[in-house]
Image (cartoon, rainbow, N blue to C red):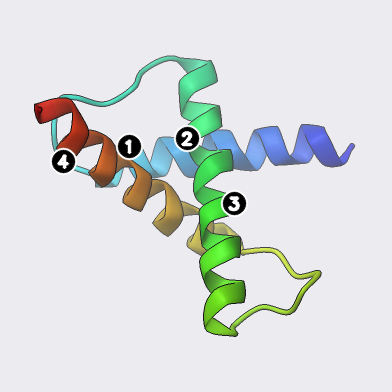
Amino acid sequence: MGILWAIIVGFLAGLIAKWITPGDNRPSGFILTTVLGIVGSLLATWLGQAIGWYGAGDGAGFIASILGAVIILLAWTQLARR
């Protein structure tokens, strides 16, 4: 059930991040949107643990997952321009 929950939350976080972030060079499709949200959540968890906001076993919340996905999309847009 944990993997299914991660997929659902990742998809929703990826959708919201794509809606917030401007630009046309964005990955599209269900799978890429889901991967974007999951990787954004992993990035937010890693950054939060590095800063000291989360403990060793804690994960990022939904808002932090969206922010992580936005960071990934902004990096994607910069790399796609080149």
Dot 3, how many residues are within 10 Å of its Cα: few (below 14), some (14-19), or many (20+)?
some
Name the residue tied to disc 2.
36
Foreground of the two, 23 or 12: 23
SS for tag 3?
A: helix
| Measured Cα–Cα span from mark 2 to mark 4 | 15 Å
Q: Position of residue 59 (x, y in %)?
A: 70, 64
In this view, the mark in front (1 or 3): 3
Foreground of the two, 76 or 66: 76
Dot 2, how many residues are within 10 Å of its Cα: few (below 14), some (14-19), or many (20+)?
many
Residue most toward the front?
Answer: 82
Q: Residue at x 31, y 40 (%)?
A: 73
SS for tag 1?
A: helix
Name the residue tied to disc 1.
18
Residue most toward the bottom?
Answer: 52
Q: Residue 6 vs residue 38: left or right?
A: right
Dot 1, how many residues are within 10 Å of its Cα: few (below 14), some (14-19), or many (20+)?
many
Disc 4 residue type? Pro
Name the residue tied to disc 3.
42
| Measured Cα–Cα span from mark 1 to mark 3 | 17 Å
Name the residue tied to disc 4.
22
| Measured Cα–Cα span from mark 3 to mark 2 | 10 Å
Q: Position of residue 58 (x, y in %)?
A: 75, 70
Disc 3 residue type? Leu
| Measured Cα–Cα span from mark 3 to mark 4 | 22 Å
Q: Position of residue 30 (x, y in %)?
A: 51, 17
Q: Are marks 3 and 4 in contact (CB under 8 Å)?
A: no
Disc 1 residue type? Lys
Location of residue 62 by image quarter: bottom right
In this view, the mark in front (2 or 1): 2
**Which of disc 1 and disc 2 is earlier in sequence?**
1
Q: Residue 23 vs residue 70: left or right?
A: left
